[in-house]
Image: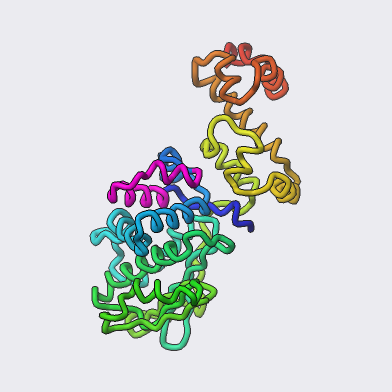
Amino acid sequence: MYKHFYVVKAQYLQVVIDTLDDLNAPTDEWLNLVGLNREHANDLDNLVLEEPIWKLFAISAQKLRNNSFGKLVAHKLESTTLIVAEQMPKTLENALAYFLNIYNEQSNTPSFWLKTDGNFIWLCRKGAPGIEHGKWQVEQFVLQFLITLLQYYFGQNWQPKFIKLQLNSTEQHLVAEFFQLATNTQRSTVELDATYTGIAIEKSLMLDTLKWPVNYQPSQSDNVISKKPSQVIMQLLAQSYFGKSVNAQIIAQHLDINIRQLQRILAKEQVSLQTLIDDYRKQLAHNLIIDTGLSINEISAQLDYQDSANFVRAFKRWFAMTPLQFRKRY
């Protein structure tokens, strides 16, 4: 799996946008800096490339001069999604099962799982390997959200005794600031440079730990997001992530990857980037001819053809008839 194709559901982008709007930040300007816009979150089930969201975390924290921006986003997510009293499962065991399955369907990157270790059950998360921009803010976002989830069951004064962080030890001061160690009487022992983010939960707080195997991985849903680069690109094309007018250069630019490298990756799947673009244009042409009253010239322009004659030739190759014949028939 390549970092260029890590995607998450658009709801994560939307919660960052909402947080920035609440802070009266120039949200659209900062979105533009990372190649995103509000339209990417029009449908919360859309996919959004993960690396630009991490960059947005980093830029926002820097420009707001707020090292706790990830924490603010977590609080925003808490108030709008999972941690709502009337929707929460009665037991932590049920909540964790629900949480693990739901949140592992939101991304195609390594995600959440449980593991046992001595007197503790660890709630773990593996971040997106290779993405470094905004890493601390994203770690902070995840950590705050998980702690708040557990505090719903253990009480607001509960703090994990042990925490693992995928954070470089040179940034110890950021961890200290986050936990406010100078005033926190229930200090957490934090291990940095860990291979995953993890929070230790005392087994004594769990109702029935025997239900959990030593290493618990969530069940795989039928709608888990594909990890195949070609399928990720096709889904992003289908939701117009790259815009209506697309070509190889635009796609590679959004993916932050060299075109030659992108072509080599797709070749391993025995597919070309041009084939994916043609399939997208074919489907879009079909929809525009059937569902709109746009002229052939207008549709040609939307599909990035330099003149309508080229579009008509492509359409005849796809459907064995001209666009006007196709519109008249269907």
Tell me which corner region of the image, top left, top right, bottom left or bottom right, holds residue 45.
Answer: top left
The structure residue drawn at horizontal position 54% and vertical position 22%, both measured from the top left corner, is 288
Quadrant hosting residue 128? bottom right
Please state, as top left, top right, bottom left or bottom right, where the C terminus lies in the image: top right
Main structural element of the magenta stretch: helix, strand or loop? Answer: helix
| Picture coordinates of residue 142, whole percent (x, y) | 41, 65
- Residue at the spot 48% in from the left edge and 54% down from the top edge: 55
Q: On the picture, is 256 further left or further right than 13?
A: right
Q: Is residue 29 left or right of residue 257?
A: left
Q: Quadrant of the N terminus?
A: bottom right
The spot of residue 170 in percent (x, y) is 49, 75
Q: Is residue 173 visible?
A: yes
Can residue 95 be spotted in the picture? no
Q: Nearer the viewer, residue 274 or 29?
A: 29
Instruction: Work out whether residue 219 or residue 304 is closer to the camera in this orientation and state it.
Output: 304
Q: Nearer the viewer, residue 254 or 310?
A: 254
Residue at the image point whose x is 44% and y is 57% from the top: 58
What span is colored magenta in the figure?
A: 11-35
